[in-house]
Image: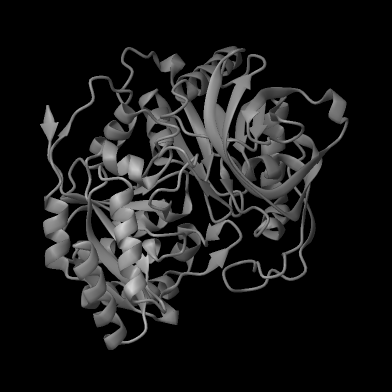
Amino acid sequence: MNISIPRVVIAGDRSSAGKTTVCIGLLSALRARGLEVQGFKVGLDYIDPGFHTLVSGRPSRNLDGFLMSPDRVKEIFLRGCVGADIAVIEGVRGLYEGLNYSDDIGSTAQIAKILHCPVILVVDAGSITRSAAAIVNGYKSFDPKVQISGVILNNIGSERHGEKAERAVEEYSGVKVIGKIPRKNDLGISMRHLGLITASECENRRDDFDSVLDKIKTSVEENVDMKRFFAIAKSACALKKPETEIFHAKSGRSEESKVRIAVAFDEAFNFYYQDTLDLLTLEGAELTYFSPIRDKKLPRGVDAVYIGGGFPEIYAEELSSNTQMLDAVKDFYDGYGIIYAECGGLMYLLEQLEYKPLEGLPGRGAESHGEGGSFKMCGVIKGEVRFGEKRVVNYVEGEFLKDCILGKKGGRFKGHEFHHSEIQLENQSNVDFAYKMLRGEGIKDGMDGIITKNCLASFAHLHAASYTKFAENFVRSASQIKKKNL
């Protein structure tokens, strides 16, 4: 069966070309026209999809050619587009940047080809005119299978500058310029050490965010030819539905096998893939959300706790001062409750978090977080986390060294890690690790996934549409514990 959906990839000629700003502006402008618009993000990223979701009103989803097969990419895309009028896919880094120099795996170009999707290239044209044509020509000829259908010139200094760059691009490359966006310092969203500030934080400062969003939307509406944009999106051909699918509800589950999973979600913890949460639900889990910052206890009757990544260091003082929640998590662990934690969640489960803002890397938004300090955390795992200047950003591959709540010995997975932190563990020689990293750094000496009782905590972030046993094994482990406690 073939399915048609107007769609476009917003790619950049490099990182920081302005893709995110342009994408957010387009999502907002399309929604203002009364359209149901679905956002996607190429690559492993939590922050940009959060903004897409906030702006579009629909959960944004990630598409990654390293983690996912072409069929999984298509399935996630088509499932996400149900009920949508148009899809906007934000690329990652430069159009052709991926895992290797020798192929397009993990790149925006790979996703554009899998989804037969026209590409609009955002070029940072600050201080260049004729050179912009050379850039577009190079991108156009590098891989003829990538359909570059339009160009948006960003950071234009003046009307004359924009006109010269536009003429050069169209004359020498044959690609239409559909937008020329002026250089404006008030269109950016604050940066932080791993990217933008999160949408959850903007939600709590909604007036400030709406003010910036309105400026971004106005700039896109005034400087992008939306008629040409729609024509490009509508030029996308129909997609064939994948033969095999993983997003389907499991039938025949007894009440005893159904589980309730408490998911930590607030300003400090909000790094979750929507498709992972969906797959847990389809596996029979009921998800209930709580805030480690504000709530005093875990939700009632939960069989497992899921603490994703985020910025616990920025909210360390608030997390540490909420001693009732720290105690509640520790009590749940002591009672052999299932706990799964990734990166920021791992930090929260340690005894101490030591944090001092690095120079040039502010704390909460544009504000300083003081001098930092050492903060008490849950104490589920014996050790502490410290922050340094080393930045770890990797795709990872791992193998299960032993059975645990997410898998069996010998199983393999792909994922990613990104952080500025280092873990110092007590009795390091006796630490029980679940994962051997075949690619990536992990916690210590290429090992990751600390096991203690029914807790599993790692630097590695997993996506349930990549490691397809994730949801099944997580729910089964929680169900087994539930039966023991009945």
Going by the image, does 98 lie left or right of 56?
A: right
Answer yes or no: is residue 478 visible. yes
Q: Nearer the viewer, residue 393 or 427?
A: 393
Answer yes or no: is residue 23 visible. no
Q: Nearer the viewer, residue 1 or 225?
A: 225
Q: Residue at x 44, y 23 (%)?
A: 468
To which quarter of the image does residue 225 belong? Answer: bottom left
Going by the image, does 463 lie left or right of 33?
A: right
Q: Residue at x 15, y 56 (%)?
A: 232
Q: Residue at x 64, y 69 (%)?
A: 362
Find residue 479 and report its horizontal and vertical position in percent: 51, 17
Find residue 76 and report its horizontal and vertical position in percent: 31, 35
Going by the image, does 148 lie left or right of 207?
A: left
Find residue 115 and report its horizontal and vertical position in percent: 25, 39
To which quarter of the image does residue 14 belong? Answer: bottom left
Q: Nearer the viewer, residue 338 or 149?
A: 149
Q: Is residue 317 above or below residue 215?
A: above
